[in-house]
Every structure is written in C-alpha cells, then in structure tokens.
C-alpha cells in the first residue's frame, strides 16, 4: 500500500530542493550560506508537517468507536497493523507491527474509562 504524499509536504520539499539548487548556483559564499540555511528550514518544516500528520492519523484512529487504533512505521512510513492490545484498569498498551519492514512499535496510553471517571 503506497501512501499519497501530502500536497503541503510536497511543496515544502520542492522549496527545499529549489533552495539547494540556488545555493549551488550562488556567486558569493554569503549567498550560498543563506540558501543552504533556507533549504534546511524548508526541510525542518516538511518534517514537522509530516509528524503532525502522523499524530493526527493516530488521534483520529483512537476516536473511532468500531475501528482499531492505527499508526505509521518510523522506518518505512507505511501503515502498521495492530498486533496486540492489552487493556488493564487505567492503562492501555497497543503493539503495532509493520507489514512491510517488520519493525514494531508499542503505544502506552491511559485508559479511556480512567479519563472519563476522572472528568466526572
């Protein structure tokens, strides 16, 4: 399953690439350093946006009543499969496994029932 690249992230990556090209073609060292810093900042922005998108996916998946939680692999950035869910009083532990590269991730969360009882 291939993921579609977010248009905003693609734009940031294009801007970083353009800044790198401008740095390569710069006439002065000062101009080159400026464009290199800009390329780095565009890459940071793309990375931050990608992280926010992953967090949004996880939070949205946790709010669905009839769907299992989901997450993305840190290595290949593909959707991971929920392997185990351990739910105890006040604690939920989800183990995910990537079907592409085989890496695993564990999420420890406070239980929803604990959150609701504390709020009332």
Image (cartoon, rainbow, N blue to C red):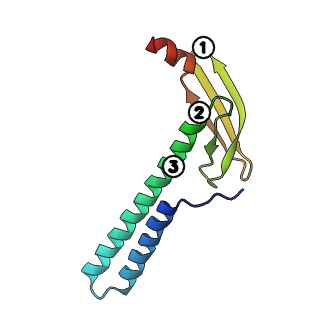
Disc 3 versus disc 1: distance between alpha carbons? 30 Å
Q: Which residue is mark 2?
A: 62
- Is residue 55 shown above or below 117? below
User: Do callouts 1 and 2 mark residues in contact (Cβ within 8 Å)?
Assistant: no
- Is residue 118 shown above or below 7? above
- Is residue 91 shown above or below 53? above
The x, y position of residue 31, in whole percent, is 27, 80
- Closest to the observer, 26 or 52: 52
The x, y position of residue 38, in whole percent, is 34, 69
Q: Which residue is mark 3?
A: 53
Q: Residue at x 57, y 29 (%)?
A: 108
Q: Which residue is mark 1?
A: 89
Assign a secondary structure to mark 3. helix
Assign a secondary structure to mark 2. helix
Location of residue 36 (image quadrant)? bottom left
The x, y position of residue 7, in whole percent, is 51, 62
Instruction: Answer left or right for 106 relative to 26.
Output: right
- Closest to the observer, 4 or 95: 4
Q: Residue at x 67, y 24 (%)?
A: 86
Look at discs 3 and 1 and give the one toward the viewer: 3
Location of residue 17 (image quadrant)? bottom left
Q: Residue at x 64, y 57 (%)?
A: 3
In the picture, which quadrant includes the C terminus?
top left
In the picture, which quadrant includes the N terminus?
bottom right
């Amino acid at each position: 399953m291939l993921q579609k690249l977010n248009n905003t992230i693609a734009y940031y990556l294009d801007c970083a690439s353009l800044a790198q090209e401008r740095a390569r073609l710069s006439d002065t060292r000062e101009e080159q350093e400026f464009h290199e810093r800009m390329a780095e900042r565009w890459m940071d922005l793309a990375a931050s946006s990608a992280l926010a998108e992953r967090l949004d996916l996880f939070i949205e998946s946790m709010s669905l009543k009839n769907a299992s939680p989901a997450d993305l692999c840190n290595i290949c950035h593909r959707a991971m499969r929920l392997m185990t869910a351990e739910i105890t009083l006040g604690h939920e532990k989800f183990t995910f496994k990537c079907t592409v590269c085989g890496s695993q991730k564990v999420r420890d969360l406070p239980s929803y029932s604990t959150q609701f009882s504390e709020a009332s």
